[in-house]
Amino acid sequence: MRYSAIYFFCFLLLVTIGCKKPYNPPVIANVPNYLVVEGTILSGADSTIIKLSRTVSLSNGTPPKPVSQATLTVESNANSTFPLTEIKPGSYASPGLNLDNTKQYRLRIVTSDNQVYLSDFVPLQVTPPIDSIGFSVLNNGIELYVNSHDPNNNTRYYRWDYAETWEFHAKFFSSDITDGKQLLPRNPDQYVYYCFAGDVSSTILLGSSAKLTQDVIYQSPLGFIPSTSEKIETEYSILLHQYALTNEAFTFWTNLKKNTEQLGSIFDAEPSQINGNIHNTGNPKEPVFGYISASTVQSKRVFIYNTQLPREWVPNYPYDCEVDSLLIKQPISMVNQVQEYLIPLGSSELAISPIYVQNSIVGYTAAGRTCADCSIRGVVQPPSFWQ
């Protein structure tokens, strides 16, 4: 009897799942064309970059639509103005702004259809320096963290973003290169074994000392790098940017983080309304996504070398790689495999090393380009700051 009940329950479950139909609410099916504003008004040597885009449906997988041909201006409450120039579709920039930190600032946006958007006036926050960037070695990787403090106890609210760069290598070293007629030993400037790649932070990184007596940020997490990652197989660098926030800006970023990164289980926070500080002057009820802050920025770069990490850590290569043996005269078919697979320009296979028999080259070991040419996933030239 008990098994019959179980079978009946499974039958009902299968029927229920099989009868499910996707439901797309009108608000999702008909996505409004809302304005999205990203960026911070920066004072100092760093450029102010503001990005404008329009909302799109997540279901169709299309990227945000950039908003071009708009006019952007930073304005102070003392009637000073600083224009921004469109540097690529949807991105507007101004070189280092020398702003007065006793004044307040806002952003004015005039779109190509003459819609005017204004952010609220905000104070210019002075960001304290970054004390240090460090990492903790865990069993399965490293945890990056930042330390900072404000001796005047004025900051309290912090935000970070970063750009990371790392050196990695191909699975195999390709010793020879084709000129379309023959294979020749590679010159050092033709090596494609070591390369460099990079990325930028994709999560919202926040810290607060509001509940502490002293304005101190201690080992605030920045991210985790697995022990199997290519990022730390040779050398890794992170360039961290630190911004001071007002309480209102910190609240905005905290709510945005909850709604975009911390939802998905019954234990996560409930979604909340995200209130920005940008408004359409002709239609105050129009939702506009974004929050414009004004601050100085502090930056710091550190390097992490594989010699600082456990020797037993081995990176996972992203491709399955095998070595083939290609002969000048294949014994059975008599085909010249080297001529067929390695000599043509643009071949999908690269020579790894010659095969010698009695001091004569009879063929080459070879591997797919993805396994022997790192430039497919990076650049050979090291960045100017590399050390």
Image: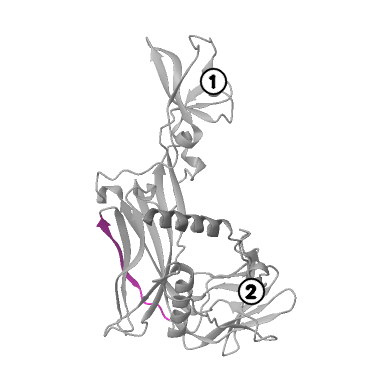
Q: Position of residue 40 (x, y in %)?
A: 52, 75
Q: SS of the residue at dot 1?
A: loop
Q: Main secondary structure of the magenta part?
A: strand
Against 105, is 312 above or below?
Answer: above
Q: Nearer the viewer, residue 365 or 316?
A: 316
Q: CA distance from mark 1 to mark 2?
A: 57 Å
Q: Is residue 337 magenta?
A: no
- Regarding residue 189, the answer to whether it shows in the image is no
Q: Residue at x 52, y 19 (%)?
A: 338
- Which residues, given as a range, are shown in magenta? 126-138
Left/right of residue 35 with respect to residue 103 in the rendered view:
right
Q: Which residue is mark 1?
A: 182
Q: Position of residue 201 (x, y in %)?
A: 45, 62
Q: Nearer the viewer, residue 52 or 316?
A: 316
- Regarding residue 237, the answer to whether it shows in the image is yes
Left/right of residue 160 with respect to residue 122 in the rendered view:
left
* Label ID, residue 35: 2
